[in-house]
Amino acid sequence: MFYLTWAHLYRMKIDYGGYSADVSLPLMVLVQRLTLLSANLADGHEVAKEASSSSTSQSNGHSSVKPLSPRTATLTPARRRYAVLKLPSPIQFFSYCINFQTVMAGPPLTYNDYLVYIEGREAERLKSDDEREIFKKNRENLLLPIKEIKKYALEALVFLLIYLGICQFFRPSFYLSDRFNDFTLLEKIAYLVLTGFTMRQHYYFAWTLCALSCLTSGFGFAGFKDDKTPDYSLVKSFNFKESEFPRNIKELADNWNLQTLRWLRITIFDRSPPAYRVVFVFFVSAFWHGFYPGYYLFFTSMAWFSSIGRQIRRRWRPQILGFLPDTVWTWKPPGVMEGTSTIYDTVARIVTYFMVNYTALAFVVLSFHDSILIWSRFHFAGHLVCLATQLLLLLLPTSRRPTSNHHLKSQ
């Protein structure tokens, strides 16, 4: 991490605000791998202590197992799954850190997934005899999925052509020009939407290309889905629809850069105090990206917006759904009514789409001065809306989620 810090600072010194490729991107991936492996080893130590405690209890003739330690008892299923029980050998360690498919741009695969791949033990992760039989008969096609490879190749080409075709018309630098300042607010928002869509295409292209390199080398098979179709989620980095049209910041975060999300969840989120998890995740994300002020403006704003979004969903959403004519209520135990509304979801998507594109401008232009200048040309609309919402949340009473009895009485 110290070397990555130096690389980020050196890049800022010699090419401030530039997008030239250098060693910092492979170092970012390496930091993910090393911290992920460290976390997995720590979890493996806890799992081993749990197993040792259980076997000791049984050998002493006790029928009950000793209670788990507080740390072991809180291990999530994901942390248990990826826990590493044995320290890797030097060749295993360096092979994992610098394997040729993912050394340049990821994804930051876990050590257990890599070891299963390199040792050819994919059948061990299957859940049933039926799945193992299917895998045995179709092993070659499942590990080298031609149809999936063609799909990723086509998607990568489309993302690249979209980016190259329209990026010249929607450049972030235009936001700083006097001509943009003369636009009406609606024209500025339209340009913002098109610029945001354009800039995301090169991320989609890079992630799809990385997934393609993994699939063509035989890595990516994660088992079978519930409908027995192959699952290649090990190399999937985003869900396009949810990333482009999220209902809220949480949905965007859950579907954007999935592999980095898993890294942050295992190493930071699951190990932090509940009250500070989101803040810690956003801070580590900013620090990992570098030291441009725009990163910290972006992640700080997103953490704030995400917090407000959670409060709205918890406190206001049930009451708002009660007033909308298209709300459909379904009963969920224990005695709680869950509502869905197309009107609510549509408005939420529009607001979220603006907030994300507006905030991401700081991530793109990088400097503090330019970020504040661009936001000012939108009259700080995103931040003012959130500030007003925050004040209303403090002043207005909390609405209760309707129960099934309450809903039936209202009818």
Image: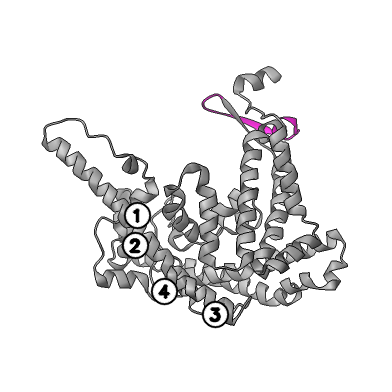
Residue lying farthest left? Answer: 60
Give the x, y percent position of residue 327.
Answer: 70, 34
Give the x, y percent position of residue 100.
Answer: 39, 76
Q: Which residue is more in the foreground, 140 or 295?
A: 295
Q: Earlier in the sequence, mark 2 or mark 4?
A: 4
Judge from the rendering whether residue 337 lies leftward or rightward of residue 217; answer left or right.
right
Judge from the rendering whether residue 185 lies leftward or rightward of residue 351; answer left or right.
right
Which amino acid type corresponds to the residue marked 1 in the rendered image?
Tyr
Residue 32 lies in what quarter of the image? bottom left
Which amino acid type corresponds to the residue marked 2 in the rendered image?
Tyr
Residue matched to label 4: 101
Q: Which residue is more in the foreground, 259 or 387?
A: 387
Residue 107 lies in what quarter of the image? bottom left
Region rendered in magenta: 321-335
Q: What is the secondary structure assignment of the residue under circle 2?
A: helix
Near mark 3 (Cα within 10 A), the count class, few <14, some 14-19 or many ≥20, is few
Residue matched to label 1: 82
Name the mark nearer the viewer: 4 or 1: 1
Kindly indicate whether the residue at mark 3 contacts the one at mark 1 (C-beta within 8 angstroms). no
Q: What is the secondary structure assignment of the residue under circle 3?
A: loop
**Residue at 20% of width from left, 39% of height from top?**
54
Name the mark nearer the viewer: 1 or 3: 3
Q: Earlier in the sequence, mark 1 or mark 3?
A: 3
Residue matched to label 2: 111
Q: Earlier in the sequence, mark 3 or mark 4?
A: 3
**Mark 4–mark 1 distance (CA, rounded to whole Å):** 21 Å
**Mark 2–mark 4 distance (CA, rounded to whole Å):** 14 Å
